[in-house]
Amino acid sequence: MGGVPADLGLPDLPGCKSHTQRAMVLAGFLPGRRLLRGALRSADPELLGVALERLGARVEWQAEGCRIQGVAAAPRPAELFLGENATALRMLLLVVPLLGGSLVVDGAPGLRARPLGAVLATLHALGLRTEGEGLPLRIAGPARSIPSVLDVEASGTSQAASGAVLGMALRSLRAGGTGRVRALRPAAPGYLAMTGSVLRGFGCEVRSRWVGPDLQIEVGPWGPIPEEFAIPPDASSATFVRVLAALHRRAAVPFVGPIGNPHPEAAVGEDLAALLGAAPHAGVVLDRLGLRPDAFPALAALAATRSGETLLTGAASLRAKESDRIAAMAMALQALGVECQELTDGLWVRGPLRADGNEPVPVPAPADHRVIMALALLGTVLPQGVSLPHRDAVAKSWPGFWEWLARVAEVT
């Protein structure tokens, strides 16, 4: 589409959701009042803010970010509703009992379907009983036994391990000493590195080392705790800007983030280079995409514009995100006339897109923010555009997505 401007609409990227939620959990249980400058205010952080208030903290959204007065005592017993916020769910289910609290948690239908096996196994290792294997879930804290090294399964998702690391760090501040978590076979170690980075920003010492296939993380002691923490721009949102540039062969707007940003999506440039550098009919293999779960739909969309074959693999964990992202992208791309086959851990894709007709192509898609964003980008390269359901899903991570895209392409 020739109308796409060279500056890609000068996107104002939102704050990183992953950084925001980790920082909110820490600030919610630290003594004192602090500002999370640039915090993302979207559906997930707002739900987490309400949950933290029910547990005893005070959360105030301001123009410059989120200001939180933490609860330094044991969290209040609380009943929480977390919508579709799986990160907050898995973190709070471990942080709260480690700090001596009790809670009942429930969520929307999509969250109820998310696997909780790693969290439940860790709670049982802490001497806690749980009713059932899913939501709603009741946890009666405090944790009864703390092993010298808390093992957490991380082969499917790192969120439970991140919650354990945050909980053990907060516990070490209150009780003194250090805490250790061993993330077993982590599928996405970059998110654990991000958790460690946020902890360091709050004054907690963090030391990580690999023990065979497992990542052992030691937290504590703490130094001075700053009154302000800066949330970086969201690398996941930046991925969609970079993919739009690739779709239209524009120079990507540089992503400005912290030096050495551990966010896994910051490494998507290697995937884009492989796709853009390949000959038109050449095969391309993108592997280990489970490390970049938010980029997968966008990369699959870009692959759909190629006449060559693209293999996107190493992403089995994406079947348990907000949607089954592998199945969702296969269904959507097939509706657009793209040859596409599901693999156990990814997709085989061969384009190009169908470009016939005058009416927008109706594309089936789940209410998954990253899937909707990726398919919207594809609509900018089809003359007739696309028609998508669940437009509001993008509010989960980038409330201004449609406003930005409207500056780039015709959006109705």
Image (tube, helix red, strand yellow):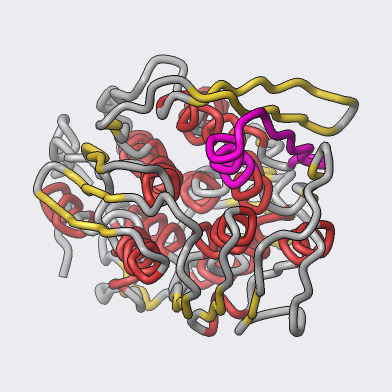
| Res. 50 visible in picture | yes
Tell me residue 298's x, y (percent): 46, 48
Tell me residue 294's x, y (percent): 50, 48
Toward the viewer: 17 or 405? 17
Toward the viewer: 78 or 274? 78
> Is residue 188 shown above or below 403?
above
In which image quadrant can residue 232 be found?
top left
Query: Residue 167 vs residue 361: left or right?
Result: right
In which image quadrant can residue 102 be found?
bottom right
Farthest residue, direction right? 212
Which quadrant, please, contains the C terminus? bottom left
Query: Residue 354 vs residue 139: left or right?
Result: left
Tell me residue 53's x, y (percent): 33, 66
| Res. 394 visible in picture | no
The residue drawn where x is 75% and y is 62% is 123
The residue drawn where x is 55% and y is 30% is 196
The residue drawn where x is 38% and y is 78% is 362
> Is residue 143 shown above or below 276?
below
Farthest residue, direction top? 259
Magenta stretch: give its range.
165-186
> Is residue 67 shown above or below 205?
below
* Magenta-span inclusion, residue 177: yes
Query: Residue 154 vs residue 16: left or right?
Result: right
Tell me residue 9's x, y (percent): 14, 40
In which image quadrant can residue 257 be found?
top left
